[in-house]
Amino acid sequence: MKFEKWVLTFFLLSIFCIFSVSAMASDHDVAVTHDAGHSAVTEHKTAHESATGEHGAAHAGAESHGHEEAGHGHGHINLGEVLPLWSCTPFACMLLSIALFPLLAPKFWHHHFGKVSAVWAASLAIPFLIVYKGTAVHDLLHIILADYVPFIILLWALYTVSGGIALKGTLRGTPVVNTIMILIGTVLASWMGTTGAAMLMIRPFLKANDYRKNRTFMVVFFIFLVANIGGSLTPLGDPPLFLGFLHGVDFFWTFKIMPHMLLTAAILFVIYFILDSYHYKKEGLKGAPVEEGEKEPLKLEGIYNFIFLGGVVGSVLMSGLVDWGEVNTLGIHRAVQDWVRDGLLIVMGILSLLATPKRLREYNEFTWFPIVEVGYLFIGIFITMVPCLLILKAGAKGELAFLIAVVKEPIHYFWVTGTLSAFLDNAPTYLTFFNTALGSFYPGLSEAQAVPLLMTETSIYLKAISAGAVFFGACSYIGNAPNFMVRSIAEEAGTPMPSFFGYILKFSLLYLIPTFVVVSLIFF
């Protein structure tokens, strides 16, 4: 009976959601009547420049060209200006499902999370298509083809390639060893992306600590540092910074937020080492347990996968450096180099599968479940997130105008950009406040003229936007894509992970937010 009750409750909520979002029709009719004759021809430039955590590195190149849907403006209203704030209800329900179902109905969630995601996606998409017709088709196709597809291809490629690299040998996770491993991952993150570094390091990290009783906090701090904070120093590290690079920010300009990154990382490393040392002593471990038999020296197998990993990073970088024109796919204009990049990423993953012996993946306990879970859940997140992103992009003309209006000081940019990045796509959030800063300080100047000034005269604002977008991705499981994947891999390996709210309440609010307060007081 419990199962039937959960199903009934879930579908009653989804029906409510469908009817509530369908009410957009009345708002739409009012808006069209009021603006008859001119609102319908407002050109809509969709710029969802990426999606949840690492999501944008794979497709940010397409967004940078900005010609998005040239010629699509005929009869196309700007939905961000007419959508009510409560049209984000399906997105909120999607997040609540991720947060509550694993706690309240774990068996149901494990077997049906894909169906849950599909229902919430449909609860937004169906009324959205009915009310806004062609405009809605365009926006949904755009987020699927230009955002979701490149996002999942990039994650699949990195997950597949890194799964073929095995660290063998006797390695036991003492506080010192663990801190060094997280430090290595943190350094790698800025050069191979947070997803690449996290996928490369998480399995050896889990294996080294499989004898420890309390491993949950270890993985959480791994997410903090390797999957997020570590990606602060180059455009390759995290999608928002890559977007800035595509919009004229110098490649090495991001080194200017190195002091912010070093302070944040230093505080978190100190906290981690204290926690690890405490639990290590509490568990009565005076030294790492001795392995039975001979001590096996450390060695890497499957190192040829680093070639494929380099191909993944090179493909992403290539897509931001060249311009081979655009191609129209189902009415969505994407840059040719972005399709080429996606194809190369698939090739890298396939080559890794062909080149890597099955025994290495078995040694890594490699399964497809984590990437399948991310794929199912994030299609629901991406689709239900459409109204939120459109309203945010509408700026002063949207329902979040009050929020845009109060963002004036560097500390405002840091916290508002960061807070939204923790639960929405951090790349469009970055771009929204990037453009807000340009418009506030250099109105009338072209982007090519204004960006160099933003990097020099008012660089503190760009630092605040950049640091906020990257750092706050660590605040929730959906803040950055590798967060979710690391959690899934850890749970498969037998490490219990906190719930959605448990992660925020027990770790983010306790350790991250005070750290960010210190950073903002010192730098902003």
Image (cartoon, rainbow, N blue to C red):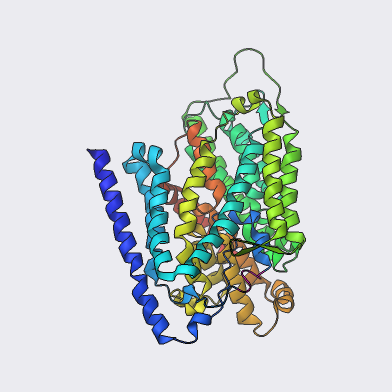
The residue at 64%/23% (across/down) is: 359
The range drawn in magenta is 66-71
Residue 321 x %, y %: 76, 60
Q: Is residue 419 magenta?
A: no
Would you identify the image quadrant in which residue 144 lies? bottom right
The residue at 62%/74% (across/down) is: 71
State the residue in front, 119 or 364: 119
| Left or right: 226, with 386 as reference point | right
State the residue in front, 399 or 351: 351
Residue 152 x %, y %: 58, 48
Q: Is residue 68 magenta?
A: yes
Whether residue 523 is visible here, answered yes or no, is: no
| Left or right: 64, with 321 as reference point | left
The residue at 70%/42% (across/down) is: 347
Quadrant housing the N terminus: top left
Can you say whether 62 is above or below 492 in the image?
Answer: below
Would you identify the image quadrant in which residue 311 lies? top right
